[in-house]
Amino acid sequence: MKALKKILVLTPEYPPRMLGDVSINAHSVSKGMVKDGILTSVVTFDDWRPGETVEEGIRVSRIASPIRTFYSILTWTPLITPEFVRASSKIIRGEGVDLVLSFEWTTGMSAMTLGTIHDLPLVCAYHSVECQRNPFRDSPLSQGIAYLEREVAKASELVVATNEDTAKFLRDEYGISVAKIVVTRLDGDVGSLISFCRQAVEDHEGANA
């Protein structure tokens, strides 16, 4: 049975770039993975600090957008996806990866692409979903974001929600199976998340057997 030894974390933000809880939690999860003996690599967006470093035992690859000005988050995402895929594929080819952990929908397209190209299991984590954040759910922008959130969740072996409300929306609004959703906090002990990720690796291997 294949074990979880190497993980790739995709996140739109990572310290010192901090726009909200995603950065804090991606950092917490990555440190917890390393503490558990898992080789952890992070690929994140950071226009001001592009390049590769090793921080607290974590390999961090920061990428920049090829275009600095964009009209909306929906145009930014497909522009940055090739950069995420390029940097991530370099890591996968160089040292191997057992699982991709994607934070939020903005890195979901990259995660789905990597999963398909390299035949890797995918776990996605949501702090919230569009129907929670936006009262104007019928707008084209909101519908586009919701569509991507749903597709990433469907493509994942496991969907992590950081709270019960988000889990409920994933079930009721996006039609994600209850069996596929787990609720766990990501800002402290990440032992539960590691167990879930290990199970995702085993499930993926079993499905491909």
Image (spheres, grey):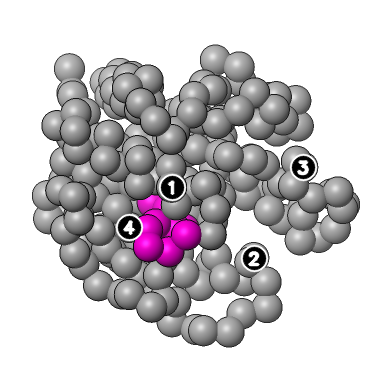
Q: Nearer the viewer, mark 3 or mark 1?
A: 1
Please name the residue shown 63% across and 66% down the image: 73
Amino acid type at mark 2: Leu
- The residue that mark 4 highlights is 43
Q: Badge 3 is on which residue?
A: 131
SS class, disc 1? helix
Mark 1 in CB contact with mark 4 (< 8 angstroms): no
Magenta segment main secondary structure: loop
The residue to which callout 2 is attached is 74
Q: Between disc 2 and disc 3, whose residue precedes? A: 2
**Residue at coordinates 16% horizontally, 41% vertically from top-left?**
39
Residue 170 vs residue 113: left or right? right
The answer for how far apart the CA atoms under marks 1 and 2 are is 24 Å
**Label whose residue precedes the other's in the sequence (1 or 2):** 1
Which x, y percent locates residue 178?
Answer: 61, 17
Q: Is residue 17 magenta?
A: yes
**At 50% from the left edge and 84% from the top edge, which residue is drawn?**
67
Residue 15 located within the stretch drawn in magenta: yes
Q: Which residue is mark 1?
A: 24
Secondary structure category for the residue under label 2 = helix
Q: Which residues are magenta?
A: 10-18
Q: Nearer the viewer, mark 2 or mark 4?
A: 4
